[in-house]
Image (cartoon, rainbow, N blue to C red):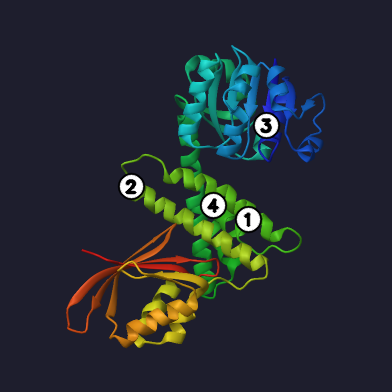
């Protein structure tokens, strides 16, 4: 059977190698000359044109990186038309479940089967045929794809129709990234308390806290030096963020549970951004929560210099009446005006931390003794300074 495979990246290349070693006639395709040159599996036909690859194939695997790349590749169905009626597409990319469903519907219009296959286990497991697969497909399409799927996996879970494979993979990644975030956080806390980082990791790994995530998460944010060090953090961040952003859109009733998991993932993303900044020679970013605490201390003390030290140079500040001030000079003048008019004395209450910053509910005591309920929404730059602050009146 002639099988095409488009996308020879860190996961696509090992899958294509495994297929070739399992007796499939593989046409390996990537638009990158460097990727093609690196793919040196014997007996494989190399092809740079996805349409030509589809025309030569009975089944076609796809493992591109982003939703946009996938949509551009499929186009208006031209890739399906090139594959031909009776062909089968096997999607190994991690994309939005709704996109997989949309592309499956388009495939059906061209008489092409569509199998949605999330993969877990990494490149070495792919080459050894030991991936775990999360599959969404109609039964007939799955049976046509089964020889392919069994060649690369040791566990195949058919979770339902197209889209369920993506959802299963996203939930798998949600577990992983949240656990990475929690593991990295606890080791940072321990190091801040004076523990030796590696000694404590070794101690945890010998006890009830041991886990794959504990072995991986803290290591992900360790300093890297040399050419490309900041970029390696950037690439890791963007890869994880893509999946976390898809998880934010999952339609669930368990919103509190999902929010907790997303918060742990967001910590991991922020921690990687910090590692990237440090690898690039920058200072360790300020803790946004400490920035917020410093804000209230400065407001209460009417300390304009301490307050302005918390703002980024091009920050914006919006007050409840809708007026907005941009740049530190304008923000300084606005705060001085508030101080001069007898600024409210703020008592912070509930604090909410999320991907869009921190929101703090405030009970502000006015000069006449009355209380005005407000909320501040803080957004931060990479250094942990306030990039935007919007104040609202509640109730």
111 w.r.t. 332: above or below: above
Upstream in the sequence, badge 2 or badge 1? 1
Q: Is residue 86 left or right of residue 227?
A: left
| Residue 249 screen position, x and y as percent | 42, 43
Per the image, the residue denoted by label 4 is 213
Per the image, the residue denoted by label 1 is 234
157 w.r.t. 364: above or below: above
Q: Residue at x 68, y 56 (%)?
A: 231
Between marks 2 and 3, how big is the CA–CA gap? 35 Å
Q: Residue at x 63, y 55 (%)?
A: 234
Q: Residues within 10 Å of mark 2 (few under 14, many from 20)?
A: few
Upstream in the sequence, badge 2 or badge 3? 3
Mark closer to the observer (2, 3): 2
Q: Is residue 26 left or right of residue 310?
A: right
Per the image, the residue denoted by label 2 is 255
Quadrant hosting residue 65: top right
Between marks 3 and 1, how big is the CA–CA gap? 25 Å
Q: Quadrant of the C terminus?
A: bottom left
Mark closer to the observer (2, 1): 1
Between marks 4 and 1, how big is the CA–CA gap? 20 Å
Q: Decide which of 245, 138 is in the foreground and name it.
A: 245
Q: Is residue 220 left or right of residue 52?
A: left
Between marks 2 and 4, how big is the CA–CA gap? 24 Å
């Amino acid at each position: 059977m002639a099988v095409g495979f488009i996308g020879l990246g860190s996961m696509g290349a090992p899958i294509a190698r495994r297929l070739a070693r399992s007796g499939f006639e593989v046409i390996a395709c990537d638009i990158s000359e460097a990727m093609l040159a690196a793919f040196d599996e014997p007996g494989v036909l190399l092809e740079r044109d996805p349409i030509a690859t589809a025309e030569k194939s009975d089944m076609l695997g796809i493992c591109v990186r982003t939703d946009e790349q996938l949509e551009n590749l499929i186009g208006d169905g031209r890739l399906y038309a090139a594959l031909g009626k009776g062909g089968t597409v096997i999607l190994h990319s991690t994309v939005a479940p709704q996109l997989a469903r949309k592309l499956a519907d388009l495939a059906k219009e061209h008489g092409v089967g569509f199998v949605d296959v999330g993969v877990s286990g990494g490149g070495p497991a792919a080459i050894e045929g030991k991936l775990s697969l999360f599959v969404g497909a109609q039964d007939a399409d799955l049976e046509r794809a089964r020889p392919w799927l069994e060649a690369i996996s040791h566990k195949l879970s058919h979770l339902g129709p197209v889209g369920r494979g993506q959802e299963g993979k996203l939930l798998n990644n949600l577990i992983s990234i949240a656990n990475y975030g929690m593991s990295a956080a606890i080791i940072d806390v321990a190091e801040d308390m004076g523990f030796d980082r590696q000694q404590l990791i070794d101690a945890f790994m010998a006890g009830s806290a041991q886990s794959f995530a504990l072995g991986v998460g803290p290591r992900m944010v360790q300093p890297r030096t040399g050419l490309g060090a900041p970029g390696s953090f950037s690439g890791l961040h963007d890869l994880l963020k893509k999946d976390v952003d898809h998880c934010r859109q999952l339609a669930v009733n368990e919103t509190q549970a999902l929010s907790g998991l997303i918060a742990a993932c967001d910590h991991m993303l922020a921690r990687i951004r910090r590692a990237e900044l440090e690898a690039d020679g920058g200072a360790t970013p300020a803790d946004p929560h400490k920035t917020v605490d410093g804000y209230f201390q400065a407001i209460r003390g009417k300390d304009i210099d301490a307050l302005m030290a918390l703002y980024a140079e091009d920050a914006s500040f919006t007050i409840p009446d809708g007026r907005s001030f941009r740049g530190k000079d304008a923000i300084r003048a606005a705060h001085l005006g508030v101080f001069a008019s007898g600024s409210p004395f703020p008592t912070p209450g509930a604090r909410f931390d999320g991907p869009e910053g921190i929101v703090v509910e405030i009970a502000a005591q006015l000069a006449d003794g009355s209380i005005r309920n407000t909320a501040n929404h803080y957004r931060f730059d990479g250094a942990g300074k306030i990039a935007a602050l919007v104040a609202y009146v509640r109730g």
